[in-house]
């Protein structure tokens, strides 16, 4: 099934601690063509709570896609990715590492932990919008997802 075939908006979890990057991502998703809900977890610990529907995230939806910053407070992106990919109920959710780091060791580590892709963040809004459109085109319209049990 393609995410574009859903009869509901696509649920996207953005794990990002930078308010300006959150705003940039929200604006880019507002320009996207598919209906989506963008949820924000400002720390790695919040991301795990969201995914487990703990505390203030008790009514959180299961995300169809996760955009994960690599350098996070409290719980690093690599820890979040490792936990997601180790958990049976979460490991099939595509995780796209979207970060400012272009360090080879970060790219290698992300793929070793089973990230679905690694995308360096551009600083220019128009480039960022193009990346979000590319994410939408590929992950929502082209890629096929396994249906939930």
Image: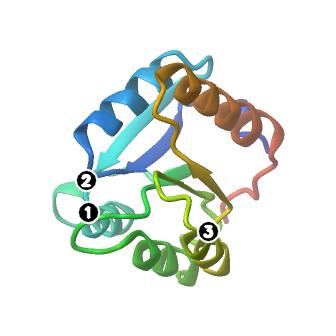
Tell me if label 3 and label 1 are in contact, CB under 8 Å.
no
Q: Locate residue 82, reporting x and y percent.
A: 50, 80
Residue for badge 2? 42
Q: Locate residue 3, reporting x and y percent.
A: 69, 39
Q: Locate residue 102, reporting x and y percent.
A: 56, 59
**Kind of element beneath mark 1:** helix
How crowded pointer 1 is (Cα within 10 Å; few <14, some 14-19, many 20+) is rated as: many
How crowded pointer 2 is (Cα within 10 Å; few <14, some 14-19, many 20+) is rated as: some
Looking at the image, tell me whether mark 3 or mark 2 is earlier in sequence order.
2
Depth check, front residue: 107 or 3:
107
The residue that appears at 76% across and 58% down in the rendered structure is 146
In this picture, residue 37 sits left or right of residue 112? left
**Kind of element beneath mark 2:** loop
Please name the colour scheme applied to the rendered image. rainbow
Residue for badge 1? 46
Tell me if label 3 and label 2 are in contact, CB under 8 Å.
no
Residue for badge 3? 107
In this picture, residue 57 sits left or right of residue 113? left
Q: Residue furthest front?
A: 103
Q: CA distance from mark 3 to mark 2?
A: 22 Å
For the question of whether residue 64 can be seen, the reply is no
Q: CA distance from mark 3 to mark 1?
A: 23 Å
């Amino acid at each position: 099934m393609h995410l574009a075939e859903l009869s509901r908006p696509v649920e996207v979890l953005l794990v990002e601690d930078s308010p300006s990057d959150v705003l940039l991502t929200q604006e880019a998703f507002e320009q996207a063509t598919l209906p989506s809900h963008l949820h924000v977890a400002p720390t790695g610990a919040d991301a795990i709570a969201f995914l487990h529907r703990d505390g203030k995230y008790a009514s959180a939806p299961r995300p169809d896609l996760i955009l994960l910053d690599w350098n996070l407070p409290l719980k690093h992106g690599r820890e979040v990715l490792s936990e997601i990919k180790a958990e049976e109920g979460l490991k099939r959710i595509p995780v796209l590492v979207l970060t400012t780091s272009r360090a080879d060791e970060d790219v290698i580590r992300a793929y070793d932990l089973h990230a679905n892709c690694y995308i360096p963040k551009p600083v220019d809004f128009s480039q960022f919008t193009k990346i979000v459109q590319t994410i939408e085109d590929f992950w929502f319209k082209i890629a096929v997802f396994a249906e939930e049990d």
